[in-house]
Structures are given as C-alpha cells and as structure tokens.
Image (cartoon, rainbow, N blue to C red):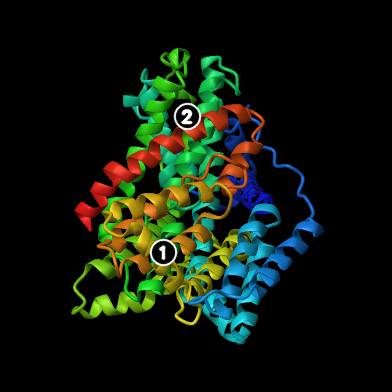
Amino acid sequence: MEQVFLTFQSGMSEILQEQKSSLYNYHVKRATNEPPIKKEKKRKEKECVTMANTPKPAGPVPKKLSVVHCIITIALMILVGMIPPVAPLTPYGMKVLGILVGIIYGMSTVDVFWTAICAILGLGLANGAIGGVVVSALGSPLVWGIIMSMVVVYCMQAEGVTDLFANWIISRKVLQGRPWLMSFAMLVGIAIIAMINPIAAMLIFWNIVYAACDRAGLAHNSPWAQSMIFGSCFAAGSGVLCLPVMNNGLVVSNLYIGMMKEPLDPIKFVATMPPLVLVCIVLYILIARFILRIDVSALKALEGSFADKAPQKMNTRQKIVTIFSVGMIVILLLGSALPASLPITGFIKNLDLFGLAAIVLLLFAVIRVDGAPIVNLQEGASKGVIWPMVFMTALVVPLGSALTSENAGITALITNFLTPILEGKPAWVLVAIVVVVGVILTNLAQNLVIVSLLLPIIIAMSSVMDINIPAVTILLALGTHFAFVLPSACPAAGMMFSNPNLKPTFAYKAGLICLVICTAFTLTVGYFWVNLIW
C-alpha cells in the first residue's frame, strides 16, 4: 500500500509544484505580450498565500519490497490452491480462492503493483490460458479508457484547473464567519476533485487548511486541522465513486457488467451515489462538531482573503481543458441516458471512455495556444498514468470473471452454505452481513478487490432471495470505500497517516466513530434510498 501512496503522492506533488513554477510560466501565463522573465517575476510577486508559507507534505522514503512477504504471498496463492476442494467447489475454484487469499495478503503487506502482476499470472496459470487472461485484463477497453483518462486528468492538473476550482470554493462570501459551513464546503470540494484525482484533491486542500490555520493563529496540528486532514481522506475516498464513468465508479460499473452481463443505469447511479456521499460528509461534520467537539471559534473572524484570488479567472488554456474534459463526461453519461434507438447513442457507446478520451487527447496535442500545445502526449503519458491503479483495475476484470465462473463452483458453494442460514429471513439481513464484512475487510485490503469478492455472494443468493442487485451493488461499493481506519486501507489513508500534523490516535478515534455511524446510515437510510431509485 505504501508503494501506491508513494507513487500517487510523489506524482501529484511534482505536478502541483511544476504548475507553480516552470510549467506555470510556460503553459498558463501567456495571455499578454510581456517577456517570460517579466511574467515569472509578476507570478512570484502574486504567489498564492495558500501555497506559500506552507510546507508541502513530505513523503516517506520508499521502502524496498519485503522478500519474506513476497514469498508468503506466492506461497498462499499456490498452497491454498492445492487444498482438496469440497463439492461443489472444483480444483479450479480452489486455485482461484488461493489467488484471492494471496491478493489480500500481498496488497496489505507488499505492494499493489507487484501483487496485481502476480495475481494476473496466477489466474492465467490456473485456467491454462495466460494469453487469454492478459487480454481480458490489460486488453480490456476499461483499462485503456482509464489510461487515456489519466492523461486527460494530468492536463487539468498541469493547467491549474483543480487549484482554480479549490480556491473558488473557499472564497465564497457565504462561508465567511461560518467555520463549519466552510469546513463542509472544503470537504465537498475534495469529493468533487477526487472524481478526477483523490490524491491531488487532498494535497490541494491540505495547503488551504494550513493557510487558514496561519491566518487564524492555529497550529497546523490543531484539532480543527487534524479533523480536516482526516476529513480529506474520508471525502476523497468516497468522492472517487460519484461518477460511473470515472475512477472507482467506472471500475464498479464494469465489474457489475462482467458479472451480470448487463450495465448499471448511469442516471440511477448518479441519482443514488452522490447524494449518499454528500450525506456522509454532512454526518462527518456533525461528528466533528458534536462528538469530537472540535473548537472552531478562532476561524469565525477568518475572511476569504487567505484564498488565492489571482487565478480565479480562467485563461484560454484552462477554458479549453475544462470544456473538453467536462464535455467528455457529459457525453459518456448521455450515451446511456439517450434512447437506444437513436444512431448517436450507438456511436457514443461504441466510442466509450477510451474513444472519447483519445479524441480529447489528440485535439489537445494539436491545439496550440500562445505557441504551445495543450499537452505533449509523451510527457502526459509518463507523468499522468498511475500504473499501480491501472494494474489494480486490470486485475479486477479477470478476477471477477473467475470468482463467478461456473467452472469454479464458488457461487454454488456460497449458495449451499448461506441458504439454510438465511432461509425465511428478509433480504436486508444478507445485505447487512455483506456490507459490514465489506466495511471491515476494506480497511485491511484494496476496496475494489473486496467488491469483487463480495458481489458474487449477492449474485449467488439472488436466486433464492428477493435481492435488488443493482441497489445492493451501490451500497456495497459505498461501504467498501469507508477505508480510513488503517494506513493499509487505501492510498489516501496511507497518505493521511503519513502526515506529521495528524496524530494516529485522532485518526483511529474519528475513524471508528465514522465507520459505525456511516455504516448504520448506509444500512438504514441508504438501503431505503437505493431501493427507492432502483
């Protein structure tokens, strides 16, 4: 997990730093005819208080892979798979379970990238067709769509669009003199930017939090600052789910398609997931105010002047990047919302994320503003693509297919085991069990792996219980993204725990309280809401 966090943090820090220095002058400040030296001088004179006087989060020194943990990971994949299966589980199913056990252990103790490669190789050896598994993993449109979208996201960050949006949010007059409303707005901003990149969202708003502390006379490790550092992980971890065409929301949607052979309705997805995430953020603000009793009195006199006012007006390059990026997302959503009989609907679905992102990048490469292209494709590919996330996504595709394969017998085993236990009980009982197990496991291993592990249980039991599978998929996805109690939970959690201004005791206390309250909300109000929409 640390390797993923380090890859994310170092990459995002580099982008944020570059856009404030050389790239800022090269790409952004070309609107006038002043010489570059003068522009750079003016830029330094107007340097944002938010980014100045604030130390960048320092990442820990990368650790070498533990040989012992690597050996244990491989041993689990092999040895568990050699255990004699119990019918209806097949030898192939036992090998798949062995690989799954190795994945959970390896991603918690070794590294996501290394473990994902091992698992893809293992799945290929298990079914005797490595080429087929590699094609289903790395050759899927989902994986290539994510790679292309990462380069588009890089363009947004390199041009300072995310910084501009963050500073616009906190400079609203309605937030002045209302510390809790300002805190809520910050977390909502993090969730929105997390749809693009969760780590960049956290880094940007940490600096804004520190700037607010400096202006209010608070220490960077004050209770309010710690509550916002933790809250940033909470909001970013949930925000990545809000859109079915981006980040983890896209992976969950494709995982569902792979298992159910039918798509999740994107309009219903957007009608259920973002409201649930928004209410969870509200719950966290209430927890911070009434349970953790965070003192925000020093922030009441704070004005929006600590925000960077200079970049709140978009330049030509930022407008182009924003219009094309937002347009790409809107078109993707329209492809599933428009009637299937329309020719344009089939065209959009055929393009999918890969096609649309590829068109956007090709245009960015040829559109020149002030003598420079929006993006250099080689630079964007080398700096924007986060390979651990790519391979994590690539693994989920063949893993989900293997877990639900009739040749494995895993779903039949689950059905035979749970049917006598849950017979005559309402579907909510099964949903509650699965979601609670998911909430616990997600703090020990990768959330997408946990979704791919638990979703087959819901699907298997739908044959004997009245289960609304799309609705439960939304709840399961949300619950498995409450990953903030342990550093191993997700890259954002690893980054949060590495922040020297956050005391681990605060994170554990806030995390456990949030886990209980948000899980209860998910299984009550959330359960009613998703079944109402779906």
**Residue 213 x, y percent position in the rendering:** 54, 21
Name the secondary structure under disc 1: helix
Residue at the image position 65 percent from the left and 43 percent from the top:
37
Q: Amino acid at mark 2?
A: Ala
Q: Could you tell whether 438 is left or right of 77 in the image?
A: left
Total number of numbered discs in the rendering: 2
Q: Could you tell whether 147 is left or right of 286 in the image?
A: right
- Above or below — where is 494 with respect to 206? below
Name the image quarter holding the C terminus.
bottom left
Residue under pointer 2: 307
Q: Is disc 2 surrounded by few (<14), some (14 to 19) or many (20+) residues within 10 Å?
A: many
Label 2 or label 1, whichever lies nearer to me, is 1
**Residue 472 in view, yes or no:** yes
Name the secondary structure under disc 2: loop
- Above or below — where is 462 with respect to 249? below
**Residue 369 in view, yes or no:** no
- Above or below — where is 30 with respect to 207? below
Q: Could you tell whether 476 is left or right of 336 in the image?
A: right
Residue at the image position 19 percent from the left and 78 percent from the top:
342
The alpha-carbon separation of the residues under discs 2 and 1 comes to 48 Å
319 or 456, nearer to the observer: 456
**Residue 243 x, y percent position in the rendering:** 37, 56
Q: Amino acid at mark 1?
A: Ile
Residue under pointer 1: 457
**Residue 389 x, y percent position in the rendering:** 57, 61
Q: Are marks 2 and 1 in contact (CB under 8 Å)?
A: no
132 or 428, nearer to the observer: 428
Q: Which dot marks residue 501?
A: none
- Above or below — where is 394 with respect to 165? below
**Residue 141 x, y percent position in the rendering:** 47, 75
Which of disc 1 and disc 2 is earlier in sequence? 2
Q: Is disc 1 surrounded by few (<14), some (14 to 19) or many (20+) residues within 10 Å?
A: many
